[in-house]
Amino acid sequence: MNLRSYLSSRGISEAAFGQTIAVSQAAVNRYVRGERMPTPRIMARIVEATDGQVTANDFYAQPDTSEAA
């Protein structure tokens, strides 16, 4: 699950989540939009805060496998 989906499905604001993981709302917004990759330390906080529902792999684009080559 990506971070945007996690926050949306639980009604958590970027600001509130930022407080939980000790970063600014702006940083969370950049993570959500894919403009910034969390550092390993912040990534660990995200995984912990989401009970493992958002992981490092969720920050990388997954290839579209709907059409076989």
Image (cartoon, grey):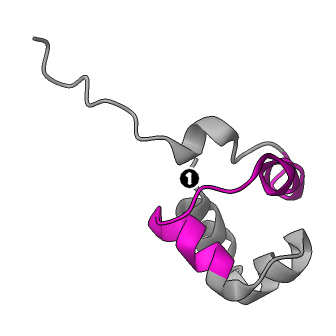
User: Is residue 36 a member of the stretch shown in magenta?
Assistant: yes
Q: Is residue 18 above or below residue 50?
A: below
| Residue 62 placement (x, y as % from top left) | 39, 34
Query: In the image, what residue type sits under mark 1?
Result: Asn
Categorize mark 1 by other alpha carbons within 10 Å: few (<14), some (14-19), many (20+).
some
Q: Is residue 63 above or below residue 3?
A: above
Q: Which residues are magenta?
A: 27-51
Of 56 and 6, the residue lying toward us: 56
Quick one: which residue is furthest to the top in this view? 69
Secondary structure, magenta segment, majority class: helix
User: Is residue 47 a member of the stretch shown in magenta?
Assistant: yes
Q: Which residue is mark 1?
A: 2
| Residue 31 placement (x, y as % from top left) | 58, 65
Of 10 and 33, the residue lying toward us: 33
| Residue 44 placement (x, y as % from top left) | 85, 47
What residue is at 66 percent from the left and 74 percent from the top? 28
Q: Is residue 43 above or below residue 57?
A: below
What residue is at 57 percent from the left and 43 percent from the top? 58
Is residue 23 among the parts visible in the rendering? yes
Q: Secondary structure at mark 1?
A: loop
Is residue 13 among the parts visible in the rendering? no
Of 28 and 65, the residue lying toward us: 28
| Residue 35 placement (x, y as % from top left) | 47, 66
> Quadrant location of residue 37?
bottom right
